[in-house]
Image (cartoon, coloured by chain):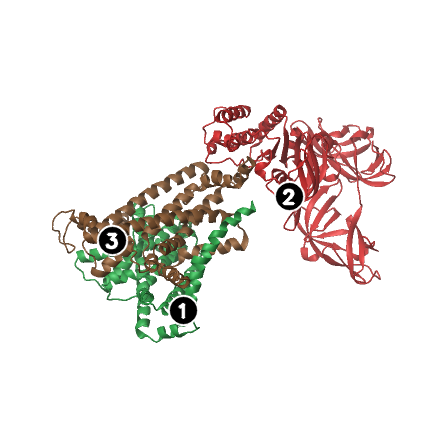
Chain colours: A green, B brown, C red
Amino acid sequence: MTKRSTLAAPYQIFLVLFVVLPLVLILIYAFMDGNGGFTFSNFATFAGQPEAIKTFVYSIEVAVITTVLCLLLGYPAAYIMSNSQLNRSSITVILFILPMWINMLVRTLATVALFDFVRIPLGEGALIFGMVYNFLPFMIYPIYNILKKMDQSYIEAAQDLGASPRQVFFKVIIPLSMPGISSGVLMVFMPTISTFAIAELLTMNNIKLFGTTIQENINNGMWNYGAALALIMLVIIGITTVFADSSSNREEDAGGPI
Amino acid sequence: MKKFLAQAYIWLLLIILYAPIVIIAVFSFTEAKVMGNWTGFSTNLYSSLFTGGINSSLITAIINTISIALIAAMVSTALGTVAAIGIHNLRGWRRQAITFVNNIPMMNPDIITGISLFILFVTIGLTQGYLTVVLAHISFCTPYVVLSVMPRLTQMNPNVYEAALDLGATPMQALRKVIIPDIKPGMISGFILSFTLSIDDFAVTLFTKGNQGLETLSTYIYADARKGGLTPELRPLMTIIIFTVLLLLIIINIRSLKINKKLNEKNGKKVLV
Amino acid sequence: MAGKDAIIEIEHLSKVFGTTLALNDINLSIKKGEFVTLLGPSGCGKTTLLRHIAGFIKVEEGRILMEGKDISEVPPFRRELNTVFQRYALFPQLDVYDNIAFGLKLKKLPEKEINKRVKKMLKMVSMTGYEGRDVNSLSGGQQQRVAIARALVNYPKVLLLDEPLAALDLKMRKDMQIELKEIHKKLGITFIYVTHDQEEALTLSDTIVVMKDGRILQTGSPIDIYNEPKNAFVADFIGDSNIYDAVMIEDRRVSFCGHEFECVDEGFGNNAPAEVVIRPEDIYVLPNPAAGQFTGVVRSCTFKGVHYEMFVDTPEGYEVMIQDYNAFEVGSEIGMLIKPQDIQVMHVSRVENIFKGEMVDSNHVDMIGGVFECPQTGFERGQKVTVRVPYDKVDLMDNVEDGTVCANIDFLLYKGNHYAIHVLTEDGYSARVSTNDVWDKNDMVGIKILPGDMTIEKAEEND
């Protein structure tokens, strides 16, 4: 009876303790100085360090480039796999999904191995390649999902009304797959902007990303400054999420790829 | 022609996607210091992986990884299942609030989850180590269990619980004998998912493992790779990891295919497990 | 009322869900071995009442007795009764045998005894040989049989059935009705059966309890309820009927449809307002108009399988529904005759709306959730008043904004030449309306009352 709803109570407490409270703590620490007083100085420090700003901007650039590349490479792949005339077997889909479950670190090291193998020195190129390599499946999967579910009669209706294949693609298929695109963009952009270990390994620690900056500060005991940087990252991610959400009504298509 | 080009594109991407994995696997069977230099077939890297002097810490890391994943998965499954039953019986704003908060750990980037938990443990003065890693893993695994179990509950005939009471079962017995068996497939999916997520995790573990020397497989690899890049002994280790994960995934997929098929037969509905 | 042979007694049971009164002071005594049906339209509270008896809803007001003992606080798993659910609620992970054995295993009966009882029940519901079957592979009818066996195997003193046949198709439903009746006869235990199907209720029950809006309207045998409905709602709900406004001229003389008839009812007083029910099969049709008590012209005639159903218009403007084995040509004039014992006269408590209200100023009154203009009264603001409005002076407006109060058509009845309508306002007040306009149930309307149609009196102090 109604009493069963009390079973949610333990988890409610757990969520407050281990999800809500930690996020609130980031907020508090970000506005706190070493003595526990309220301050904006952590943000001022960030704004006053050209090096930090540069890393920040560079991280966004890398994330944007990775996302765009993933979209450009991934959309055709998703489209081909969802189209029954071009691809019948589902084995390719599974092959694209499987690597999503291999540890990110392991996959990154595997790209390092590839670069070693073909004797190309690590650096910016390797960084972008590694990022795309790591996150491409996350772009393909949601787009594939939405294209697969798409009602074929829209396409037939468009053809019936005189649209050329080109027009059908740009005026019907792309707009209808927007929810998948925005899911994919989120699933690629979010981890790329927040990554820290991948850049280290792919560039022999020559290129620093924003995530690495945060990690280093936390490791060096600069918790307040680190929290402030984490908050800045949260805001960027929040904005992206809101932007992606409003560009299309995302449905459940972002669900886990099992 | 069009189809050929399309297929060629797909397979090209797949080849690039799998090439590093294949290269690693192949070169784990040679002792060459540098990738690309085949110096003859050898399983020495594998045997030294487990016998070499430095590598008792690797064994410890593997044991840690598995034991943390098992504990986290078990606790998450229990906590998440009970929570799902509770949430299922909640209405109104409380349900919306808890569902919203439940989604946060899944949306949050690992680094934010890691840092926020790190700050939490520092603030409450909990020494970071095994316990904090387990707690952190439970916090990002349980939402997935809740999500796996909820659909099973929604599908359940709401009268089934009452029928059990009606036939003389106490509320606890009804839960154990009727509800739990009915949502078991969701619980198992949730358990496997939690286990995989826990094994796979790197960032959250790194921030919550403290400095008492606790290592899991991924932090071990990270520490190793950070020191000297991709050292030869990492190759067999990565090969093992990759193929274990692939094997696990194949098992899960066959399982969920079977469950889906069974459910389809039962009520003609497609259910995402 | 606590008869010695009563097994379930319900005393002053009320239940509020949010703002609606789901059960309103229910009093009911159910005899041992009876087949009792709770009958009513959806939302009348019949399922809520059943779920109270089963123990799924906590008793908040009133009490429920079983064999004289108060079971209001007893949890469902300790009540000696079992339920058959509308959608069966079989345990999907258990096979047929384990579903039926579920209750017995909880009671830790010896395996042999369980086996014997399950086999016996399977035989009773004609499902022998289905022990190992997956319940999900069974048809609806078979699942229902398993559900019945699962409940009966515990030898309950009372079996509760919540619209158990609603999900079955017509043919299967008829078969199961006969089987249920046989099972009841064989076991001799009490069945409490919930349905909205009046035909099912008439076929199965020893006693029918007709419910509406959380209240019991009438309790009685199927024959009593059919032949002597207590009010127009019961008459309309059970079977086909002609319902007319009437005047009881004196004992055994009633006037309706513009004619006087002899009847068997007494004690209403002289010239008392009443309603009459005449079942369509109780009207005799005579080809010679002069031979009947009153005449009419056949408007339509339809063959209904066994009888013909005819609608006849009388010169006085009333519509009469008749069921007869003979067909009469459309357009022909006929005579009609009703025997005194076939006229069921029902008491009518009031002939106009009586609203309680409070004056806002001398010519505005606040009642049924709105402020109405009324004639000059000379009463002061705050004066409690009683407002009388005849049924036919309440206007229902298509456009909700045109009325003073917004309401919902709750119940409507055709009375031969006009509709009698109950409306419920948004705030839960009810009003009755007589009208020639055609409305549908659940239509939203605005209520308008002209000031000249109100009669306002000071309310009595203790009102």
Callout 2: helix, strand or loop?
loop
Seen from the viewer's position, the closer of residues A220 and C407 is A220
Residue found 28% across the figure and 48% down from its top: B3
Q: Amino acid at mark 3?
A: Ser
Residue linked to disc 2: C59
> Please, which chain is the residue tagged with disc 3 on?
B
Residue linked to disc 3: B57
- Apparent side of residue A230 relative to residue C425 in the rendered image (left or right): left
Q: Amino acid at mark 1?
A: Ala
Residue C363 location, x and y as percent? 80, 61
Residue found 64% across the figure and 28% down from its top: C305
Residue linked to disc 1: A30
Callout 1: helix, strand or loop?
helix
**Between marks 3 and 2 in the image, the one whose residue lies nearer the viewer:** 3
- Apparent side of residue B107 relative to residue C114 in the rendered image (left or right): left
Seen from the viewer's position, the closer of residues C426 and C96 is C96
Instruction: Tell which residue pokes out farthest to the bottom in this image.
Output: A48
Residue B267 marker: none
What is the CA distance from the residue labelled 3 to the residue labelled 2? 64 Å
The answer to whether residue C361 is seen in the rendering is yes
Residue C18 location, x and y as percent? 63, 50
